[in-house]
Image: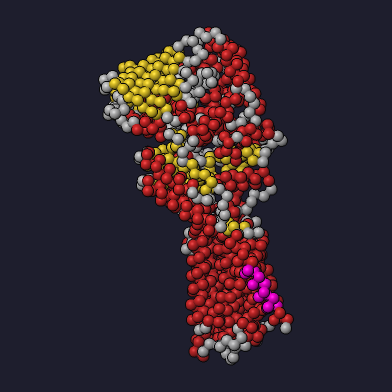
Amino acid sequence: MKALLLSACLALYSLSALAFSAPVPRQLSTAPLLYGLFVQEKSIQGIKKPLVSRGDFLVAKDKGVIWRTQKPFSAAVAVTGKGIWAVQGGSGTDPKETAAAPKRTPIHQGNLGATMGMIQKILAGDASSLEKAFQVEASGNDSAWGLSLKPKDAVLARFVARVSLKGGAHVDEVEYLEANGDKTHIAFSEVIESGGALSSWPALVLQD
Amino acid sequence: MFRKTLALGWALALAACAIWLALRLPKASLESSIFALLPERAGDAAVRSASQALRAEAEKRFLILFADQDPERATRAAEAYAARLKTSKAVAEAICAIPPAGAGRMLDFFSPHRYRLLSAQDRAALRQDGGALKDMIQRGLYLPPGVSGGLGFAQDPFGVFGRWLASKGSAAGGLTLQDGHLIAMVDGKTAVAVLGVLGPRGRGMEAQSALAADFAAAAEAARKAGPVEIIRSGFVFHELVAARQANREMTSIGSVSAVLLLILMLAVFRGIRPTLLGFLPVAVGCLAATAVLLLAWSGKVHLIAMVFGSTIVGVAEDYGMLFIAGLYEEGPWDPAKRMAEVGRSIFLGMLTSVAGYVALFFVPIPGLRQIGVFSIAGLVASWISVALWYPWLSKGLKPVGPASRRAAASLAARWPKVSRGYLAAATLALLAAISLWGCLRLSVDDDVRLLYAQDPVLKKEQDRASAVLKMPGTGRFFLVKGADRESILASEEKLLDTLAQADPAGNGILGVTSFVPSAARQSADLESLRKALAGGAAAGLARELETPELAARMTTALDGGSQPLALDAWLADPVSLPFRQLWRDSASVIPLPADLALSAQALRALAGAIGPGVILVDQLQDVTDTLAFLRRHLVWVLAVGAGLVALALIPMLRLRTPAAIAPAALGVAAGLGALGLSGLPLNLFALLALALILGMGIDYGIFIQESRRHRASALVAINLGALTNMIAFGMLAFSTTPALQAFGLVLGAGLGVAWLTAPCFSPSEGNPHAS
């Protein structure tokens, strides 16, 4: 179960944390808030139709990550120091609805504080923890780079075959290849860095 | 000569004792576990067995966090610590790095049963609405990889297994696996955990100090890796500290008392032989008492019983003292004559003391009973030694010089007496009034935690670790029993569901059904999945995902994970290793977390609503209640004991009985008063001190009342005995154990008053001897 959690967390931070930053050697963004849009395309073994979803995401430096799917349906997931949550209500499912307080249902409960700390470190430009878990291969230059991550850990390798990232000023694309052959491609766009405080809905969602 | 034969026989018996002890004592297991002091829960065998199992499990395990800003340094320190600790003979396991195979084990084990296991949320959703399944699957598919649990559609098309596994995340107790290490966050620092399990080990002093040395060496190794913060949590650390303290206190109290005794005796008797004769009863008493204790408890002797017991046997020095004090009498030294003079006093003193400690037999706390046995055996053996040996051993001693004799006589003559004027009486009345005033301020605290000293550093570390790790609280658990396994599991499921609803902290509570649900629940869960699939979920998904063969494939997948899961299979697999204490002798055990807000009353009501087989056990509260119960009863035991002692004295002392008892009564009042004035609470142990004062105070009263013609020597004996005893007992007031502190204070004050007031009740010289 811890392996699952681990892969979940690594997936999330490799997706979101790296999404707005340049590759390992460069000084990365330390902005308190990062916001952007995503298009995710999953091709799953045994399912013919590619599963395409769109939405937005938010990374709050000391709080956690919100991954909000808007199409084909509304669903939000939050990762905080205390677990992974499915979020219902409030702006989670409908951007126009702002008054209602979000309802969080735990998908995973447990102390993720260490993982959150790692995300912060990677955001701050320290990729050593990433290199401990993955075999990292970098290519290209600052304006067009690629990064390929292969898990070193045997348990993690049961789930994750490879994670590849491409980008320039920000991460533009992530490809996540699972051990069972499922593939996920995520493209990011319109990434904004902000120094402001969280607005009320994300603050409630990421509350620990 | 008959007496000579007896004396010789006694000497041979003691020699045999000494040889036996020399062989046996190194092998004896000196119990220092605080729990071993406490009474076993009476009656219910299942409760007892579960209590013991939980206790043994808790005592075996420990966890140490290495916290630092730099995770690398924390990891290095943890690894160094674990590596050093593994070399310890007493440590079975010290785990820092989790092997990959171990982490994947849970997945492999549960996989064949995965569709009989639903998380509480999935179960609720599916029971409510079969159509929820389609939504659930679809939403899972669109989640970013990993978040849904990461098993993938091929292995777990419904996603329910991933969610079930994830819902067991709390079983890790706030720790997260990262890079093969268990990690927690402590105040912004990364803490790497080392999990330890103690192996079978000797409880003896040597084994303990060896283990303590291993822990210290491991900590040293960790510090070499970096100046990290070390947070220890686990019973074993408290045990080691307590054992070290008890050991240190026993040594310090014992040696200080011995040295003082030596100095006093040498000063008073100016010779080695009388001094040795003063020691002898105590030495013989301790020897015999240790042997009796080891025999009676077949080697499982409690350290605290030895500490208390040997202190109490120190009283026996009075017997030798009274005899030897005859050297202060006029005329040549005649041992046979001296024995004739004081033999009765010594016997009465022993008898009344023993009568006082017999009460301990009726206290159903193993540790206290051991104290009782040790004391009585020791006192009786001391008395026998004095009675049989001293007429021979003291032959040829020289009386003290005329100057010393005159000083003693003048002290006796000048001691204030109640019969001689109002001043002494008024002083005693004032003393009694102050004591009573103090008694009115007495507070009561029976908390069992007063029984052992908590090392403040260790307690702080433990509290921090508990807050981070959400460890189950000590000693509170539910026990679920039933006619058969299935009904036990069903009751436990109901209980866990109710607890999760009733209290936010109830969510993380684990029972065996957290891993192996009842057969009924397993079938119901599988059935609800099957129904939802057949009810349109499969067809709907096949249509929406444009994969027609999906419907048939999902049914096949369901069958692939539908094997029933049996409790025995889980219990037999290593995957259950950290959780086996949850099932005990055909009953389920559910430890409750410390932060559960529900009161014992609410919990009992909740259990009662489920069935008579669900029992709440609260070990600490139960013991505290027992101590309170015993304290209330011991007051009466003491009162009755005092009454019986008085009744026994009346035929011997007649009208002088009140005067013999008065010092003890004043001493008891003073002891209680001192306790009230100091603000320390009254508890069972303070009452035991009162029992001692009663016994010794009456000794002094008897010695004085029986010493009409040799008052000076009686006073010498009492002064010497009281002084040394007060120093020995007073030392207990400096103990770190709150219960011992109260004991020491009560004894110091009470014995002091009994000693100083006993001579005030001397019968006047002119009256004829009553006996």
Quadrant where the image shows the C terminus of chain B: bottom right
**Which residue appears farthest toward the right when viewing the image?**
B2
> Does residue B332 show up?
yes
Q: How many marks?
A: 0
Is the magenta region chiefly helix, strand or loop?
helix
Residue occupying the point 67% across, 74% down? B12
Instruction: Please tell me in which quadrant of the rendered image residue A92 appears.
Output: top left
Answer whether residue B7 is magenta in the image.
Answer: yes
Residue B312 to residue B602: above or below? below
Residue occupying the point 27% across, 22% down? A141
Answer whether residue B313 is magenta in the image.
Answer: no
Residue B328 rendering spot, x and y as whole percentages: 55, 86
Residue B553 appears left or right of A173: right
Q: Front-most of B633 and B473? A: B473
Quadrant where the image shows the N terminus of chain B: bottom right
Residue B404 to residue B233: above or below? below
**Residue extent of the magenta highlight:** B6-19
Residue A198 appears left or right of B157: left
Residue B534 rendering spot, x and y as whole percentages: 61, 13
Residue occupying the point 42% across, 27% down? A151
Residue B27 rendering spot, x and y as whole percentages: 60, 60
Residue occupying the point 51% across, 60% down? B246
Residue B143 to residue B407: above or below? above
Residue B540 appears left or right of B564: left
Residue A32 rendering spot, x and y as whole percentages: 31, 28
Q: Front-most of B464 and A39? A: A39
Instruction: Please tell me in which quadrant of the rendered image residue A188 appears.
Output: top left
Residue B184 to residue B125: above or below? below
